[in-house]
């Protein structure tokens, strides 16, 4: 079942309302959830976080709440479990191969993963329809961190990322402490500062 498809032109930041096909009830639910997050939550935006959380389904990823479950296999067939990573800082990034700002974000994520390899885990979640597209993308941009192909979009439906890309920072106790919707000016600095603040605690 396909929830996501590339737009005709590659936008700077893609809202899910523009890229989700709503031919199925499940897709319609995902679109409804993401529209409820029309106010994006950024690092340090406590007021925005409150308004978004009040209308967000309890299963979705939201600021200051435990992250939803994430259990899958990476592109190499190795098991991935967010619950098993308690005690580490985790960055979960939803992306697609056709998304230009997703590609721009990858070097920053790779740099963070390499710089803090012992205490930080970066997980990329591809919403591409085909695993081949995800593999070609990571080969081209050169990332070494864990990448999952969300083939049936079950992970995306649970987390409800409002844009492509959306990056979640999860602290050592499994709580979402930052959400970066899209990848624009200042995003790299905010992400790096949040990760380094958690690692310094």
Image (spheres, grey):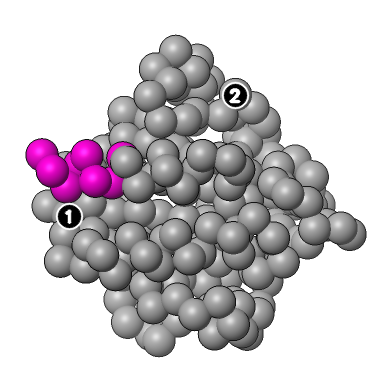
**On screen, residue 192 above or below 146:** above
Q: Which of the 4 quarters of the picture holds residue 62?
A: top left
* Element type at mark 2: loop
Q: Residue 187 carries which label?
A: none
The residue that mark 2 highlights is 39
Task: Report whether 197 appears left or right of 112.
Answer: left
Q: Is 179 in front, or is 186?
A: 186
* Element type at mark 1: loop
Expressed as whole percent of the image width and height from the top left, the position of residue 102 reads: 60, 59
Expressed as whole percent of the image width and height from the top left, the position of residue 140 reads: 59, 82
Q: Residues within 10 Å of mark 2 (few under 14, many from 20)?
A: some
Question: For the point 64% across and 55% down, which residue is it?
Answer: 101
**On screen, residue 42 above or below 90:** above
Question: For the point 50% across and 43% down, which residue is it?
Answer: 187
Q: Residues within 10 Å of mark 1 (few under 14, many from 20)?
A: some
Q: Does the magenta run of residues contain 98?
A: no
**On screen, residue 66 above or below 85:** above
Question: For the point 31% across and 65% down, which residue is it?
Answer: 113
Residue farthest right in this picture = 8
Segment colored magenta: 194-201
- The secondary structure making up most of the magenta span is helix
Observer able to see residue 10: yes
Task: Report whether 199 appears left or right of 22.
Answer: left
Expressed as whole percent of the image width and height from the top left, the position of residue 123 reads: 38, 63
The reply to whether callout 2 and callout 1 are in contact (CB within 8 Å) is: no
Q: Is 13 in front, or is 133?
A: 13
Q: Quadrant of the N terminus?
A: bottom right
The residue that mark 1 highlights is 88
Q: Give the mark nearest the N terminus, 2 or 1.
A: 2
């Amino acid at each position: 079942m396909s929830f996501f498809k590339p737009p005709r032109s590659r936008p700077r930041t893609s809202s899910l309302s523009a890229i989700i096909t709503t031919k199925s009830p499940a897709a319609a639910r995902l679109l409804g959830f993401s529209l409820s997050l029309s106010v994006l939550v950024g690092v340090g935006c406590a007021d925005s976080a409150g308004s978004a959380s009040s209308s967000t389904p309890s299963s979705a990823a939201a600021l200051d709440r435990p992250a939803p479950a994430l259990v899958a296999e990476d592109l190499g067939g190795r098991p991935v479990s967010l619950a098993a990573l308690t005690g580490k800082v985790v960055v979960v990034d939803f992306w697609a191969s056709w998304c230009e700002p997703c590609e721009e974000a990858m070097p920053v994520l790779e740099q963070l993963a390499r710089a803090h390899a012992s205490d930080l885990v970066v997980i990329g979640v591809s919403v591409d329809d085909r695993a081949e597209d995800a593999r070609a993308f990571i080969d081209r941009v050169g990332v070494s961190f864990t990448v999952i192909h969300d083939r049936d979009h079950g992970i995306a439906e649970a987390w409800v990322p409002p844009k492509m890309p959306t990056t979640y920072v999860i602290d050592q106790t499994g709580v979402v402490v930052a959400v970066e919707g899209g990848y624009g000016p200042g995003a790299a600095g905010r992400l790096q500062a949040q990760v380094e603040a958690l690692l310094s605690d």
